[in-house]
Image (tube, grey):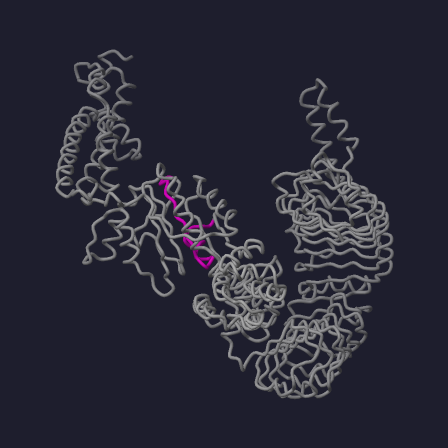
Amino acid sequence: MADPATGALLCEALNCICPTVWSHLEEPLAEEIRSFLSLEKNWSSLQTEIENLQATQKDLDAKLQSLLVPDKVPSAKVTLWQERATNLPQQSPTRKDYENLGRCLCRCTPNLLHRYRLGKKVRRKLQQVIRLDKEGNDLTLVANDPQQPFVVERPTKPTFGMDSVLERLWTYFDDEDNSIIGIWGLGGVGKTTLVNEFNNALEKKRADYHVVINIEVSNSETLNVVDIQQVIADRLGLPWNDNDSEILRAKVLLRALKETKFVLLLDDVWKEFSLEDVGIPTPNRESHCKLIIASRSEDVCINMGARQCLIEMQCLEEKAAWKMFCSNLTGRAEREIGENNDIRKHAVAIFHSCEGLPLALNVVGRAVAGLKDPREWRRAAKAISRIPGVDDMFAKLKYSYDRLDDMLQQCFLYCTLFPDYGSIKKDQLVDYWIAEGLIAPATLSDEGRPTHHDLSDEGYSIIGQLISKSLLQSSDMEKVKMHHIIRRLGRQLVDPGRFLVQAGQALEEAPEVEDWRGFTRISLMSNDLKKLPDSPNCRNLLTLLIQQNPNLEKLSSRFFRSMSSLRVLDLSYTAITELPGIDALAKLEYLNLCYTRITALPKRLWVLKQLRHLNLSKTSALKEIPNGTISKLNKLRVLNIYRSNYGIWEVEDLNLDELRELDILGITIYSEAVLKKLRRTDPLAKSTHLLSLKYCERMESILLSGLKHMEHLQELHVDSCNELKELIAENNEQEASCLKVLTLAILPNLEKVSVRSVRHHLQNLCKLSIHSCPKLEEVTWVLHLESLERLIISDCHGMENIVEERISGMQEMIPTLMTRDNGIDSGNEIDELRATEEQNGGSMHCKDGFCRLKTIILKDLPKLESICHARDFACLESIRVEACPNLKGLPLVHNRKLEKLKQICGSRDWWNNLVWEENTKAIFSARFTPI
C-alpha cells in the first residue's frame, strides 16, 4: 500500500496532466483512467441515476395499472423491463464499498488497486442504469390478454414417416450454435405439417423463451409487410396504429424483439427478404433466439441465413406412404383392397402414381375413398389426371413453375421428354439444352466466344436452380430425377401440339407417320422399336430422341428428308449400322451415336456445317471415318471417339488441328508415338478430357506426370497394353490433376501401381476399375485415394488382399526405439522411419483410408482372402461380392458411421460361410440381398 503523501502527490500530478494526454491515448485506456480519477463524481451520479430509475419504474407501474382491466396483463417486454429495473440497483456497488476506501488529505485513496477496480465497476453500472432508464421512458405501455399463450397452437393432422425429420429439426434447434434453420422441399411434401407439429411441441420450451411466433408468409408475388408486422405486434402485445408507417413499426418491433427471447417460424417463404426491414432482428448465438424458415427453394433458405442447418424434406418411403394413402379410404375400400386382387392391383397403381408425395396421397386417396367396383378402380387408374381434386393440386404446384423466368421454364419443360421413371444424366440434359439454344452463358471466355465450358456451366447452374426450387430432385452427383407428379404437371403445361412423348412405354411400333406432323420435340426413347416411318413430315422438329431402342437396326434413306430444322438427334444405344440421308439435316448441332453398331461415318457428314457436338464413343464396330470428314466440321466444340473401335494408329491420322473451336476431345490411341505427339500439341492436349490407350506396343510404364499438359483430363482407360508393367502417380508439386475415373483392363503384365501417400496425380479420383490384371496381388495404394467413391475389381486371379495391412519391419522397430534412454535421438529415428515408410507406400496412414467410399464391387477373385481391416466407412452404401470363395469376412464394425450402408449383395452360400464378430451378423443380416 502506498503511504498518504505518495497517494496525494500522484492524484495531484495526474489531475494536472490529464487534459494534455487525453487526446494522445486510445479511447479504452483513456476511459480506464477517467474511471480511476472520476470515482467520486461517478459515484454521486450513480446514486442520482438510480433514484431517477426508481422514479421511472413507479411512474410506469402507475400508468400500467390504469390500463389494466380484468382481461389484461402486462406484456412480456414490460415485465422484463420491470425485472431488470428492480435487480440492477441491487447489483450496484454499495455505500459500504465506497466508504471502505480510506482517504488521504487530497481525498484520494492510498489503495490504488482497490480504487481502480471500484471506479471501473461504478462507471459500468452508471452506464447501464442510464440506458435502462431511457428504455423505460421510451417503453410503449401495452398489455396482453392473459389467455395469450406462449405458443398459439396450430391445427395438426395425423403424420406419417415424419419422426426422423422432426428429430433432426430438434437436434438442430437444441444446438446453441444454430440460430437459423431452413426447411425446403417440393410443394405438398409436408413442410407446413412439420412446422405446425414443431410449433405445438415448443410448449415444452416455455422456460427457455418468452414467445413463439408462427407466420405464414406466402410472398409468391410481393411481401405483405403489414400482415407480418401485425402478427408480431399481436403476439408481443404491442399497440397497433393503422396510421403508422411500415418503417416506424419496424423500428418499434426491432426494439421489442431485441429484448425478447423469441422463436420465429416463417412458413411458405417464396422469396428472400430483409428481416430488419420488417422489424425482426437476425437471431444469433448471443441473442438466444431462433428462426425457422420453410420454403420450396433451398436458395431462399440459404440467402436468409440458414447456411449451416438445412433440412430437405423428401417424399415418403413406400411403407409410410401406403399408410397415408389408406388413411384417406373408407373402411370398406381398405377391406376390398385386401380381399380383391383386381381392386388391389388398380389401387396400387394409383398409389404408385403419387410417388410418396403427401399432397397427392391425400388428394387422390380422398378422391378414390368410396370406390367399390373393380371397374371404377380401373377407370381411376387409367385417368389419374381426371380424378376430382387433381386439378386443384396441380394449380398449387404450378406456383413454383410460374416463378421461373422464361429460360428456366423452357429448360424445365424439356425435362418432360424423359420416361416417367428413372434418372436423367445431367451432362446429357445440358448438352440437349445447348444444342437447342435454350441457354446463354452469363460470361464469355477469354476468346470472346461462348465455349462449351461456358455453356455447360450455365446449364449446370440451371439444374441447380431447378433442384433448389424443388422442380427437379438430385439423384446422385451425375443424375437428377423428376417427381412423377411434377412431370405430369409439366406435360399439362406443354402445348399438346408441340411435344410428342411416348418414352419408356415398351412400344414395339412407332406412331403412324401422320402423327409426327407439327411437333417440335419427339421422344420415343427407351422402347422396343424395330423400325421407324419411312418419311415423316416434321419440318418444325427441333429434337428427336430415339435412344435406347436396342432392336432398331435400320433407318429409311428418306427418314431425314423433311427434318430440315432438326438440331438434336440422339440414336445412342440402338443397333443401327448406317445413317442414310443424314446430309439433309443442315441445322443439326448435336449427334449422338454412342453404343451403336455403325461401321463407317457417312462421306457427306462434312455437309453438317452447324454440327457442334459429335459423340462416337463406345462404337465397337466403327472402322472407317472418311478422310477430311471430321476436319471439315469446323464448328465442332465436342468430339468424342473415346473407347471407340476407331482409334488413332499413326501420327498422321491425328488430323484435328483445323478444329479451332474444339473444347472437349475424347480419343482412343493405339500407339505410344501418337500419345507423345498429342501431349506435345498444346491445343489438343488442353482439349483432351477422355483418353483411351489400347494396344500400345512396347509401352512398359505410364508416368502420369507425362500427361500434365492434358490439364482437363478427367477419364483415363488403359486397355490391352500387354507389355505395361507399372503405372506411376508420383508426387505432384503442381495443382492436383482433374482425373476422376481410372480404368485398368486386360493388362497381363501389370505388377505395380505407385501412388505416394501425400500429393499425387490421383487425389481427385472418384472411380477406380481394375479388370483382368492377373499379376496384381494387392492394391494397398487405394488407401491414398482420398476422393475415391467407387471401387470395382474383377477377374484378377492373383489378387489375395485388397489392402495388405501387415505390420512392417519398421513399425515393429518403433516400440524398441521408444524404450531407449537416448532422449531426442530416438524421436528423430522414429520420425525418419515414419517418413521412409510413407515414401515406400507403407501403411502408417491406412486407418485414414476410404473416407468417401460409397460402393465396393468385387467379382471373380478366386484367391481373395481379405478386403482390409475393419474401418468406419462413413460413406459406404453398398458392397457386392461375386465368385470370391475365399473371402470369409467383411471389414464392418457396427457403429453409427455405418448408417448409410443399405445393401450387401452376394450368394447365399457365401453369406452363410462368413465369419463375424459376436452379434455382428445379426446386425447386418437385414441389409443382405442374395444374388
Quadrant hosting residue 570: bottom right
Q: Residue at x 46, y 61 (%)?
A: 187
Left or right of 107 in this view: 308? right
Image quadrant for the N terminus?
top left
> Residue 471: x and y, percent?
51, 64
486 or 318: which is nearer to us?
318
Q: Residue at x 60, y 84 (%)?
A: 565
Judged from this view, the residue extending furthest toward the top is 3
Q: Is residue 395 left or right of residue 475?
A: left
Q: Seen in the image, is 538 located left or right of residue 262?
A: right
Query: What residue range appears in magenta?
Result: 286-307
Determine if the magenta segment contains residue 145: no
Q: Position of residue 158 (x, y in %)?
A: 46, 52
Seen from the viewer's position, the closer of residues 190 and 785 is 190
For residue 59, say whether it is visible: yes
Which corner quadrant of the image does residue 561 belong to? bottom right
